[in-house]
Image: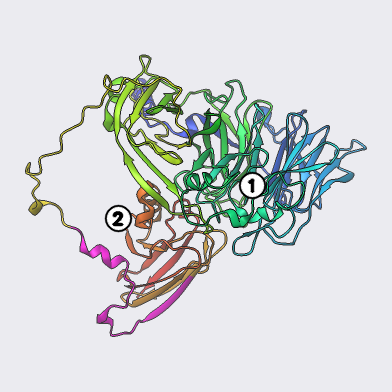
């Protein structure tokens, strides 16, 4: 009887395990490399050596060599300091038998001439000037197929981006003999860039001035990527373009529209919608694993520092220009991702840092390895442009009946302003109608004919109803396609044959008269009161000023109020990011933060404040350097109430406590 019970228990457990929702960890496993106590491994650069060791440059100026980074047979890695005293190196590469590091002011070759595993020569290969501004980060080198190298130089920051020293905001090409050629400009914070296997050069950009959201752009010689500060150097004789900053309009029109009027202005191949995908794009890694990293051979993986996650990108060329789609891939890393490098076993090393650049990963730094478990996730593999819409390819066959149902899909388009301001709200949002659906015979793809495609716009495809033949939902059910050109060369769909049958609108008299519709909760307006209530007689019991500071932090960690007292809070957003201030019931910050993240395209218009009873009081969504005052009566129940920024990606770290006492 006992054996029968145990067998039944295991059988039931197995059924539950089999039917549980699958998560990212089932397909891609994160392995943490232990870092010895006393080593501040704030990763700025990664490089895999031919013998399997891993080179790591840190923001504190050291270069470490890690032996056994794969921790074979459960053994621990060992660390040896190879170089020290560098000025915040944010790039590392192994070239011609030596490690090369890009410091703030030079590209340096680190040589171990006596073979003892420690660099004894620090050779300045190429120097570039500095103004001393804290934001003058430098990155690279990345090797080109012809053995030339690329480096990129960050703009300074003086309340906005600024090229305070020569070639800041540029990508530069260096020959093996040290000759420099300016390659492209318009860069703001080009931390991630890569040369793909076909020779194309791409770089990622962070939201900022002239950058409405994170994006990835192909850079060809003479391109202008959008931020005009670097154009100050186009008068130099070796500049590949002559565009002046005065030629760049600051109208807030979409970037695609402005590009038709500004020579050399290059629109992004892929936009990463801010907060919906990430908030600070970083490194690029092309999958050339031959299938050893899963079903995404030839696609790109892009890190995000602020959200401590990796995104996935499918690229295609339409009419000779790059465009494509981005998808979620893997989150949950221990710190902010800056660097990614393929290991010899085709797993991915992920190097992280968050000091001064706060991230959802709570550690200040980290080194992890991402490996494929061998299981194939059910995902949208690609989104491709078609003459009348999009082709969506999957990693597993879909349930055809569900895939033919238009209710399984939602399609929207939107874009951002191109202007000098930091970031941009989402603008020109439009819900798009699906005209026809064609499901492939093998169930591996679906064609969607869509009304009102818009060039230069981001097209959001949400496939929340799609399931595979085993009745499992997509691991990630949305993607964002940047449509710069429509693929007119592809065959058109027979729209009449596969046309969607529109459902008739519900009868407004079928039990839903105006008299019995739910009424708006008028009390909701009491959650954001910006003027002192008349009943207070012009007096408050307590005024509290809360500001922000860099690193996703409030400048007040804890405050105390008396239960039932009349409170005035003055919220100053001193940061260069958007923030709000939301006060929630004790123990509910996780629920509120997650609900804010799921608001999607509607979030910004609603200040990323979800309509939940757990939300007590809140401000609006505040622009940088903006201020708002709110008034409320403190809760009557004592306890620790959290005040939090619910802007997506912020809530896990940007919190404080409002202690209510009797």
Circle 1 sits in a helix, a strand or a loop, which is it? loop
* Residue with the mark numbered 1: 190
**Which residue does the image show at 13% across and 51% down from the upper left?**
517
Q: Earlier in the sequence, mark 2 or mark 1?
A: 1
Residue at 38 percent of width and 71 percent of height: 660
Q: Is residue 1 visible?
A: no
From the viewer's perspective, tell me whether residue 198 is left or right of residue 207. right
Q: Is residue 460 rendered to the left or right of residue 310?
A: left
Q: Position of residue 444 (x, y in %)?
A: 40, 19
Residue furthest out toward the top: 441
Compare residues 353 and 379 and report the one nearer the observer: 379
Q: Is residue 491 left or right of residue 243?
A: left
Seen in the picture, residue 440 relative to 309 is either above or below; the reply is above
Mark 2 = which residue? 612
Q: Residues within 10 Å of mark 1 (few under 14, many from 20)?
A: many
**Spot occupied by residue 402 in the image (x, y as percentages of width and height):** 29, 25
Tell me the magenta residue range.
Answer: 520-546
| Residue 472 is a magenta residue | no
The answer to whether 575 is drawn above or below residue 19 in the figure is: below
Instruction: Please tell me whether mark 2 sits on a helix, a strand or a loop.
Output: loop
Name the residue rendered at 65%, 40% in the picture: 193
533 drawn magenta: yes
Q: How many marks?
A: 2
Badge 2 crowding class, 10 Å Cα cut-off, few under 14, some 14 to 19, many 20 or more, is few
- Number of the label disc, if any, that sits on residue 623: none
- Is residue 220 visible in the rendered image? The answer is yes
Q: Name the quadrant containing residue 406.
A: top left
Disc 2 versus disc 1: distance between alpha carbons?
A: 39 Å
Out of 320 and 345, give the one closest to the viewer: 320
Residue 573 location (% of width, % of height)? 49, 66
Farthest residue to the right: give it: 114
């Amino acid at each position: 009887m006992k054996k029968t019970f145990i067998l039944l228990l295991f059988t039931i457990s197995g059924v539950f395990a089999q039917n549980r929702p699958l998560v990212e960890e089932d397909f891609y496993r994160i392995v943490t490399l232990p870092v010895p106590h006393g080593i501040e491994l704030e990763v700025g650069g990664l490089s895999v050596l031919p013998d399997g060791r891993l080179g790591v440059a840190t923001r504190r100026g050291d270069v470490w060599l890690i032996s056994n980074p794969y921790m074979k047979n459960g053994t621990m890695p060992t660390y040896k300091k190879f170089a020290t005293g560098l000025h915040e190196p944010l790039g590392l590469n192994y070239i011609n038998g030596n490690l090369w590091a890009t410091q703030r002011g030079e590209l340096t070759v680190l040589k171990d001439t006596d073979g003892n595993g420690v660099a004894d020569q620090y050779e300045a290969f190429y120097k570039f000037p500095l103004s001393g501004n804290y934001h003058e980060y430098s990155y690279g080198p990345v090797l080109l197929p012809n053995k030339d190298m690329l480096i990129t130089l960050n703009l300074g920051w003086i309340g906005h981006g600024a090229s305070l020293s020569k070639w800041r905001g540029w990508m530069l090409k260096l020959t093996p003999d040290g000759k420099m050629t300016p390659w492209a400009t318009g860069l703001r914070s080009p931390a991630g860039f890569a040369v793909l296997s076909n020779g194309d050069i791409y770089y990622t950009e962070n939201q900022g001035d002239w950058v409405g959201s994170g994006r990835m752009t192909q850079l060809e010689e003479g391109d202008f990527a959008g931020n005009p500060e670097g154009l100050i150097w186009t008068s130099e004789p070796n500049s590949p373009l002559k565009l002046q900053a005065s030629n760049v309009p600051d109208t807030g029109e979409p970037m695609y529209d402005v590009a038709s009027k500004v020579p050399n202005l290059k629109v992004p191949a892929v936009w990463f919608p801010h907060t919906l995908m990430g908030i600070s794009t970083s490194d690029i890694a092309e999958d050339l694993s031959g299938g050893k990293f899963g079903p995404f051979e030839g696609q790109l993986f892009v890190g995000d520092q602020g959200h401590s996650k990796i995104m996935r990108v499918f690229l295609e060329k339409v009419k000779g220009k790059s465009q494509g789609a981005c998808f979620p891939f893997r989150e949950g890393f221990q710190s902010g991702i800056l660097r990614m490098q393929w290991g010899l076993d085709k797993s991915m090393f992920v190097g992280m840092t968050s000091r001064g650049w706060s991230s959802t990963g709570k550690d200040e730094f980290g080194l992890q390895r991402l490996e494929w478990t061998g299981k194939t996730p059910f995902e949208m593999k690609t989104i491709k442009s078609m003459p009348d819409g999009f082709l969506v390819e999957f990693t597993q066959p879909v349930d055809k009946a569900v895939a033919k149902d238009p209710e399984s899909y939602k399609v929207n388009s939107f874009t951002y302003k191109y202007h000098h301001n930091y970031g941009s709200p989402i603008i020109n949002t439009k819900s798009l109608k699906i005209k026809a659906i064609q499901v492939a015979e093998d169930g591996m793809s679906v064609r969607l004919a869509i009304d009102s495609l818009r060039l230069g716009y981001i097209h959001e495809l949400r496939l929340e109803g799609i399931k595979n033949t085993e009745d499992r939902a997509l691991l990630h059910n949305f993607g964002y396609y940047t449509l710069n050109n429509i693929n007119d060369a592809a065959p058109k769909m027979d729209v009449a044959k596969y046309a969607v049958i529109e459902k008739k609108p519900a009868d407004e008299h079928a039990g839903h008269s105006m008299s019995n519709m739910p009424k708006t909760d008028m009390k909701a307006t009491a959650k954001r009161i910006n003027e002192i209530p008349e009943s207070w007689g012009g007096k408050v019991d307590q005024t509290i000023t809360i500001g922000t500071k860099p690193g996703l932090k409030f400048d007040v960690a804890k405050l105390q109020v008396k239960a039932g007292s009349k409170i005035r809070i003055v919220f100053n957003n001193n940061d260069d990011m958007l923030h709000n201030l939301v006060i929630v019931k004790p123990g509910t910050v996780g629920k509120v933060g997650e609900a804010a993240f799921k608001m999607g395209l509607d979030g910004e218009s609603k200040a990323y404040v979800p309509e939940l009873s757990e939300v007590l009081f809140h401000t609006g969504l505040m622009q940088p350097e903006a201020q708002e005052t709110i008034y409320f009566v403190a809760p009557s129940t004592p306890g620790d109430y959290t005040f939090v920024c619910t802007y997506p990606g912020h809530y896990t770290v940007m919190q404080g406590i409002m202690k209510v006492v009797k």
